Amino acid sequence: MPSFSQSGLTCPNGLTLKPLAPLANFTTWRVGGPAEWLAEPSDAEEIKFLINWARKNKLPCRVLGAGSNLLINDSGLPGLTLCMRKLHGSTLDRSSGLVEAWGGENIPTLARRAAKAGLHGLEWAIGIPGTVGGAAVMNAGAQGGSIAERLESVSVIPLDGTESFDITREELNFKYRYSRLQNENLLVLSARFRLEPGHNQQELTERTNQNLHKRTSSQPYHLPSCGSVFRNPEPLKAGYIIEKLGLKGTQIGGAEISKIHANFIVNTGKASAEDIDQLIKLIQEKVKRAYGFLLHPEVKRLGFQQKY
């Protein structure tokens, strides 16, 4: 059974639940209040233990990946927050192109490993600031590629404590920046990809590096952000629309619409989650007034009462 200590709650295998843990360091925006309880499991058994602990104590349970595309309220989050960063690792089969990765595996790390193994299909993902699990949930994409194109299946565990199961690509109902995982209380344990084997490793690595340079040279990677804030209202681009309205450089508190790329909101140093939230709403209002439609954020908000 778990036991309390000054550092929190000690569980089997030395896993610790930290009380009132600041979440700002667990998001790419570097904002957000504390988690009532925070844990960083490194395998499936620890995850199952933690989910059951939360259920027995009647606490809500939620999942963080790399903390990108995520805005956490300044007041923090009740219940148990699981950070998946330690659930990482992957295996790659050079002959078949089969790739299996844990849900907390860093997407750029996986993209580099695939290129070095001569496996084509993830070069576009080098600049995605997220994990495999988060990318599957969001159907992350960039530079013409997306997770849906290469994903075969995911293994998930329900946050109600029931047994894990697999979901195929067809069952995930992928659309632009969408999967059914966004509507279900599931944690992505792992994912299976099918890449194209037999490609030249040096060419893939060079292409991957070029993609990274293209992203870093055109986007504000020098300041904390969540990546792109809004989904593109195809065929238009959200950044273009926001820039045409003259909103680049607009600030609320420490949050600013980037002067480099208008679909980025950056933390200039002292932003709060409320600053960012208000700036998102301001952009929506200006676009709605000028164009007659609502820009839909890619950002997931945690701890807020109202939806965008």
Image (cartoon, rainbow, N blue to C red):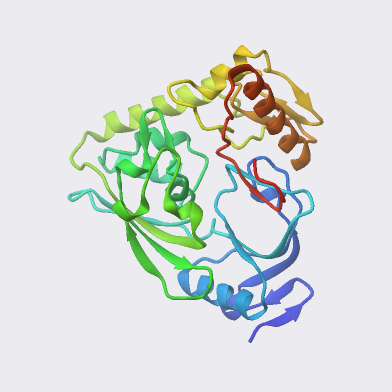
| Coordinates of residue 210 in the picture (x, y in percent) | 40, 24
Q: Nearer the viewer, residue 114 or 150?
A: 150
Question: In the picture, which quadrant includes the N terminus?
Answer: bottom right
Residue displayed at 72% across by 35% down: 276
- Tally of marks: 0
Residue that appears at 67% across and 17% down: 248
Instruction: Give the quarter of the image for residue 124.
Output: top left
Return the x and y of residue 250 as percentages of the image width and height. 74, 21
Q: Determine the residue located farthest toward the bottom in the rendered image.
A: 1
**Residue 272 visible somewhere in the drawing:** no
Above or below, 304 relative to 149: below
Point out the residue furthest to the front here. Answer: 292
Left or right, 64 with respect to 134, comes to: right
Residue 137 sits above or below residue 36 on the image: above
**Which residue sits at x=68%, y=30%?**
266
Most foreground residue, 288 or 165: 288
Q: Is residue 242 visible?
A: yes
Q: Position of residue 230 (x, y in %)?
A: 56, 32
Q: Residue at x 65, y 67 (%)?
A: 60
Query: Residue 243 location in percent, x, y?
Result: 61, 15
Res 58 quadrant in image: bottom right
Position of the C terminus, as image quadrant, is top right
Q: Nearer the viewer, residue 252 or 107?
A: 252
Would residue 235 appear left or right of 278 to someone viewing this image?
left
